[in-house]
Amino acid sequence: MNEIAESELVLNPDGSIYHLKLLPKHIAETIIVVGDQGRVQTVSKYFDSIEFQIQNREFTTHTGYLNDKRLTVMSTGIGTDNIDIAINELDALVNIDLTTRQIKESKAHLNIIRLGTSGALQEDVPVDSLVMSSYGLGLDGLLNFYKSNGVIDEEITDAFIEHTEWGSNLSKPYIVKASDQLAAKLGDGMIKGITATSPGFYGPQGRILRLPISYPEQNDKLSSFLFMDERITNYEMETSALYGLGKMLGHNTCTICAIIANRITKTYSKDYKKTVDKMIQIVLERLIS
């Protein structure tokens, strides 16, 4: 096998992966990813013990134990571009020998769970509820840079493009399903639906401050989309890349979001940190059960 070139697999002087600054020993098989660096400690405070605490750029990582289960929680920052870095480098830690720069014959399969905050796109998805993303809808275009045949759900993607009359000047959307295994383990009692992943917080999600937007009807079209029993429940900025890259690389992925705003009713959580903490405790309990 050929070595992966230094320009493609970039390592730090200590041998750690470039952006995350991690070595293989620093991560568990089950990894919780959050956007905000501060939320890493909000999760790891529930661990019984912590082995590693590592920070580089926006990537803060804590690995430890809860009961007998080894867990990692890592911040990714915001956006699918950051998820592209995080997932590729996490995969490299377990599936590429960083010393020989060769891909391992036997592949490891990580469980990667995103815990995020989100805005609802349905009137009956209330603020302070929890949503499990049954699918990730990518409005960001990231997966179009990869050979993603067999990963994207073409039927539901085509139905979405037709329903929304998606602009030809926009990135082609894609829809990817969550891991059935993680969805069954984590999603009981939660609202389930398609999570739209946007490449921005303002214009791409239909917010208007001083700049006019090209598609003011976009949110109405997203809210009215229905395929079989699946509807678009919420907006955020990472899930589609997590699901797409995770599935392509053979990892299990799932997103749980705390709804802190409702874009239809124009309401906002009075205490979203309480809802986020509730989400964290529920997911941790289910991960160790």
Image: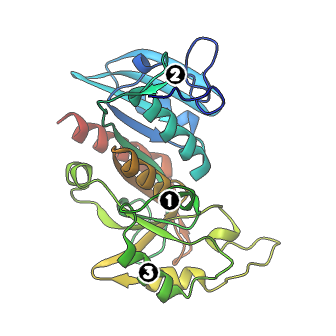
Q: Is residue 258 visible?
A: yes
| Amino acid type of the residue tagged 3 in the rendering | Asp
Q: Quadrant of residue 36?
A: top right
| Residue identifier under label 1 | 118
Q: In this view, does 123 lie above or below 198?
A: below
User: Where does the image place residue 154, in percent across and percent down from the top left?
Assistant: 39, 73
Q: Are marks 1 and 2 in contact (CB under 8 Å)?
A: no
Residue in the picture at 33% in, 57% down: 178
Chain-order first, disc 3 or disc 2 = 2
User: Where does the image place residue 21, in percent across and percent down from the top left?
Assistant: 57, 22
| Amino acid type of the residue tagged 1 in the rendering | Ser
Q: In this view, does 270 lie above or below 213?
A: above
Local SS, label 1 = strand
| Amino acid type of the residue tagged 2 in the rendering | Leu
The C terminus: image quadrant? top left
Disc number placed over residue 197 in the picture, else none: none
Counting other residues with Cα less than 10 Å from the Cα at mark 3, is it few (<14), some (14-19), or many (20 or more)? Answer: few
Residue in the picture at 65% in, 74% down: 170
* Of marks 3 and 2, the one in the foreground: 3
* Of marks 1 and 2, the one in the foreground: 2
Q: In which quarter of the image is residue 166?
A: bottom right
Q: How far apart are marks 3 and 2 (CA)?
A: 39 Å
Q: Which residue lies furthest to the left in this view?
A: 289
| Residue identifier under label 3 | 158
Local SS, label 3 = helix
- Count the numbered circles shown: 3
Counting other residues with Cα less than 10 Å from the Cα at mark 2, is it few (<14), some (14-19), or many (20 or more)? Answer: many
Q: Distance between the residues labelled 3 and 1?
A: 25 Å
